[in-house]
Image: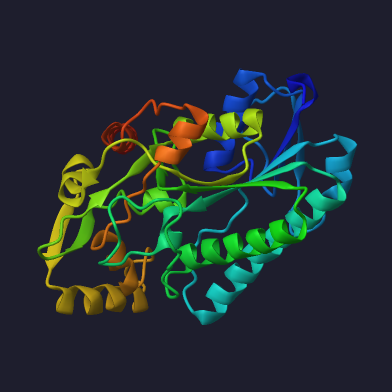
């Protein structure tokens, strides 16, 4: 396919990753046009883009056909944690409904390549996780951690869809936590709190992916039309105690028998809205990704390490705090 004929559509285009991706794709200039979908307006100048304010749970086949879209990057996802079973179910139905609608629209509009950004949490935090985890590792998400479980269910839907429609190239990118100076999504905000909870005697390694590294990786996947499943994580790790020091948070370590009930109580009382007790498993049992296959296949060298990524995020947050 000639690069000048490529038209890239992006759902969730006004979100954190979507904004960085559109900027990166526009600067690269490797496609004829960009098509952006979001319920919110684009808050930044992108010149060669057709922007549509709509919920992608509704069909987008007509506009994909109109612009002859060749690739679609699906970023639309509600990461907000539900407060109860009803909210969790509603958010899950919304996420899966959007995905199903977009896949169907891609099929009817004859989009050739579908790219989905998943999460490292689909592997689940478990004490027997190998370090690092290859992208062939089994998926064992925590059922009571909705974000990771919704990503897992989404991957299942995508796999089944791909088996039914083998002509559609499908790429799934399992990314660790994405951060950078522009981070403003619920996941990144959960890392910048005045108090962090830890479990006594545990200091697990964490990985972070720089926002523009992810955008560049997606750009390479688009240009090379690479199908498959790939882990995506920055080089190196940051240990949990080091994270607390860098973001200037007070780290409270409690024995597991106290930490889990305490976190669940603060959730039930509405004192914190970041995670139920099972979220502590994510800071107890590491999910460290092996991105070797991605680097081998694409030749990409990450521009920022996990430590550099976290530091850039922390510095930007501290600057904002000082300005306020």
Q: Is residue 212 left or right of residue 236?
A: right
Locate the C terminus by quadrant: top left
Residue 190: x percent and y percent?
Answer: 36, 54
Q: Is residue 11 visible?
A: no
Say if 132 sits above or below 179 in the image.
below
Residue 302 is left or right of residue 282, and the answer is right
Residue 233 horizontal/vertical position (percent): 39, 41
Describe residue 31's horizontal placement relative to residue 107 as left or right.
Answer: left
Quadrant for residue 35, please give it: top right
- Image location (x, y in percent) of residue 293: 45, 40
Asked if residue 112 is positioned above or below residue 302 in the image, the reply reads below
In the displayed structure, would residue 215 be above or below residue 4?
Answer: below
Q: Quadrant of the N terminus?
A: top right
For the point 72% across and 24% down, the residue is 31
Percent x, y for residue 217? 52, 33
Q: Residue furthest left?
A: 201
Q: How many marks?
A: 0
In this picture, is 168 found above or below 79?
above
């Amino acid at each position: 396919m000639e690069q000048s004929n490529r038209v890239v559509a992006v759902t969730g285009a006004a979100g954190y990753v979507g904004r960085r991706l559109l900027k990166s794709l526009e600067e690269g200039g490797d496609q004829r046009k960009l098509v952006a979908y979001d319920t919110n307006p684009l808050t930044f100048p992108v010149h060669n883009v057709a922007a549509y304010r709509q919920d992608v749970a509704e069909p987008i086949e007509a506009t994909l056909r109109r612009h002859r879209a060749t690739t679609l990057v699906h970023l639309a996802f509600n990461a907000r944690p539900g407060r109860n079973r009803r909210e969790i179910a509603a958010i899950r139905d919304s996420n899966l409904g959007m995905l199903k609608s977009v896949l169907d629209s891609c099929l009817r509009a004859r989009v050739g390549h579908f790219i989905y950004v998943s999460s490292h949490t689909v592997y689940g935090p478990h004490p027997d996780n190998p370090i690092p985890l290859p992208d062939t590792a089994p998926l064992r998400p925590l059922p009571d951690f909705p974000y990771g479980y919704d990503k897992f269910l989404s991957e299942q839907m995508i796999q089944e869809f791909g088996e039914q429609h083998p002509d559609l190239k499908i790429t799934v990118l399992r990314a660790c936590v994405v951060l950078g100076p522009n981070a403003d999504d619920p996941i990144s905000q959960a890392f910048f709190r005045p108090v962090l909870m830890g479990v006594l005697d545990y200091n697990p390694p964490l990985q972070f992916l720089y926002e523009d590294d992810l955008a560049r990786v997606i750009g390479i996947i688009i240009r090379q039309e690479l199908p498959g499943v790939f882990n995506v994580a920055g080089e190196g790790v940051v240990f949990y105690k080091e994270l607390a020091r860098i973001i200037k948070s007070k780290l409270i370590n409690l024995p597991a028998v106290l930490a889990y009930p305490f976190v669940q109580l603060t959730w039930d009382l509405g004192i914190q809205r970041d995670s139920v007790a099972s979220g502590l498993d994510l800071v107890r049992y590491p999910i460290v990704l092996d991105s070797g296959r991605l680097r081998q296949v694409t030749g990409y060298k990450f521009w920022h390490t996990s430590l550099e990524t976290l530091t850039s995020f922390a510095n930007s947050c501290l600057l904002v705090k000082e300005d306020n």
